[in-house]
Image (cartoon, grey):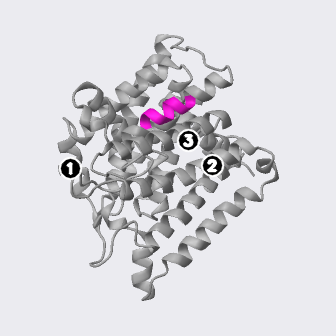
Amino acid sequence: MDLSSPWWAALAGLLVGGLAGFCVFRARLCTFGALEDAMVGHDWRRMKVFGLALGLAIAGTQLLVTAGILAPEHTNYVPAALPWLGILLGGLLFGLGMALVGTCAFGSLVRLGSGDLRSLVVLLVFGAVAYATLRGIFAGIRVDGLERIAIAVPSGTRADLPSLLGRLAGHDIRAWLAGLSALGLVTMAVMDKRLRRAPRLMTAGLVLGLGVVAGWLATTVLVDEFAHPSAPQSLTFVSPVARSLFGLLFERESLAEFGAGSVFGVALGAFIAARRADLFRWEAFDDPREMKRHLLGAVLMGAGGILCGGCTIGQGLTAGSLFALSWPLAMAGMAAGARLGIALLMEGSLTQFLRYTVVARLNWRNDP
């Protein structure tokens, strides 16, 4: 196979993204929906599906690392210094924006494939703000401000858990850490009787987890590092959406990468699934208030996603598969932002939310 063309990686992204979009649409799986179920309804089923995906992603990715196919230090998720403040702040902004929109960047692509024109507007604004934060007018604030506040990892290690724990233990514990983590996450999903009766959900988790592994493999095997040097990547939907928008408008060659292919693949896969199920429907904003909420959410997700280094898929699964130290920080920020967003939507405003929180705390203290 001639690897001189970067379009092979883009084709791989299209296929992996297409499968993910198809299965996720059929399963009605959504990261924000899973968080909302767990936080508000105390229903952890969909979170366990993402746990299944993460467990499979960890097992496959760490197998690639152990086999010498993938080098974590060559990825963008395992730097020599951890910009903790930017990651936490970015995660908080992304989570809040996700709540305002009602889904994440990945979910917006799935919705777009089913005919939701609100998601088209969200993705255009999201991509533009993300690109402005990545390389445009806001890049200086990110690079010279937030990313300078970082914690340097010890010499000879990188910002991932196996490196740090291996240094402390005095020997490599990567295989044990990967095996136990993957086994625990997969077991929690498989042992849930209700999930076993939901094959579409389980299939979606399986496809997402293996899709992360396929992404790492494709961007190491199908890329000529001499002709087109690039960092290994996998499923994530922040900077790829931004670069895809730039490629459509200005530079076609920007589309010749795994990330851009996966962006179009997710929308295409969801479109095929929606058409097959006769669920394709054109939808638009109900009123100006809904549109303003979606636009604000898109702005927050675009800026926050770049600051924290990925979306719920990019950090939650892809960075998680590497045990990157950014992963728990970003996910904690996203969870906190999503919870704040849910509370704001339920209470109607920040003032009402704070008043409700203070009153509830006072009542709790005075309750005998």
Residue 205 — which label?
A: 2
Q: Are marks 2 and 3 in contact (CB under 8 Å)?
A: no
Amino acid at pointer 3? Ala
Residue at image point 40% right, 76% down: 164
The amino acid sitting under disc 1 is Val
Give the quarter of the image for residue 80.
Answer: bottom left
> 10 Å neighbourhood of mark 3: few (<14), some, or many (≥20)?
many
The residue to which callout 3 is attached is 20
**Quick check: can you spot residue 331?**
no
Residue furthest out toward the front: 1
Q: Residue 102 at x, y = what percent?
A: 54, 30
Picture coordinates of residue 338 (x, y %)?
Answer: 52, 40
Which mark is nearer the camera, 3 or 1? 3
Instruction: Name which quarter of the figure residue 277 lies in.
Output: top right
Could you say whether the residue bearing mark 2 is in a helix, strand or loop?
Answer: helix
Task: Identify residue type, mark 2.
Answer: Gly
Between marks 2 and 3 in the image, the one whose residue lies nearer the viewer? 3
